[in-house]
Amino acid sequence: MGGTGRDDDGRGRLGNALSGLAVAVGCVLFLGGFVWGALVYQPYTVPTASMAPTVEAGDRVLAERIDGADVRRGDVVVFRDKLWGDMPMIKRVVGVGGDEIACCADNGRLTVNGKAIEEPYLLQNDGPASQKFTASVPEGQLFLLGDERMGSLDSRSHLQDPGHGSVPRSAVSARVDAVAWPLDGGLVERPAGFEALPGGVSQPGPVKLMLGAVVAGVVLIFGGAAYGPVAGRLGRSRRAGREASRVA
């Protein structure tokens, strides 16, 4: 090493230090993102097509662990209820305690407390329901529908149950934020149709920040690790060029 602070192969001491720091920070972000995700989210495999096209049968989703009190209209939730078979299910919340749900208005839309709801997530050729119905949601309960309204077995199938088709908020264990597999699934957006109702819609979980940390970690790890070989190769090329000039 000469007095210029550069190794014989062309790598500077500062560059070496920064590349090492980049790898260290990258490892923290990468591992931290995965640990964060494991604490906040639970993976869930969708068993049926009742929520198509939002999520399809076999999709792997990331569901944020939440308390039932945090659920808002429009949320896609994972829940378990004995009257529904006592197994994890995934449906969309269209009504909360005190709501009056009806289908369908003159324009063919589902109504909540008399307000027609825009539901862009439904299949293009499907209406909001395969049959007309009305339901009053008891306090502390949730009314749930599948996005594939023609085939979904949801609150409409349980209207004669004690809760008039609804499930308690405590039955909810998680809220779906994103489709992890297939990779082109993307985020599950909050529908704007429920925003004007009391309570509005929920805010997305930290899935974007979590994925951002993982991606940034990967970039820093590979970038820092690549510095040594790249700098060394450039240094050798410059040295060979200088030697060739002296010979000439």
Image (cartoon, helix red, strand yellow):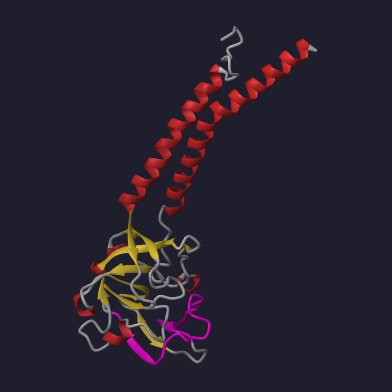
In which quadrant of the rendered view does residue 33 lie? top left
In which quadrant of the rendered view does residue 177 lie? bottom left
Q: Is residue 236 left or right of residue 208?
A: right
Label the magenta part by its dominant secondary structure. loop
| Residue 179 horizontal/vertical position (percent) | 43, 62
Q: Is residue 108 left or right of residue 94?
A: right
Q: Report the number of numbered marks.
A: 0
User: What residue lies at 24% left-to-right and 69% top-to-bottom?
Assistant: 171
Q: Is residue 223 above or below residue 57?
A: above
User: What residue lies at 33% left-to-right and 72% top-to-bottom?
Assistant: 47
Quadrant location, the C terminus: top right
| Residue 35 horizontal/vertical position (percent) | 34, 45
Q: Is residue 139 visible?
A: no
User: What residue lies at 64% left-to-right and 25% top-to-bottom?
Assistant: 234
User: What residue lies at 33% left-to-right and 63% top-to-bottom?
Assistant: 44
Q: Which residues are magenta?
A: 109-137
Tell which of 92 and 135 is nearer to you.
92
Tell which of 76 and 223 is nearer to you.
223
Instruction: Identify the residue at the far top of this view.
Output: 3
Residue 179 shown in magenta: no
Q: Is residue 13 visible?
A: yes
| Residue 36 horizontal/vertical position (percent) | 35, 47
Instruction: Identify the residue at the far front of this view.
Output: 247
| Residue 201 horizontal/vertical position (percent) | 43, 66
Q: Is residue 219 above or below residue 114?
A: above
In which quadrant of the rendered view does residue 200 lie? bottom left
Quadrant location, the N terminus: top right
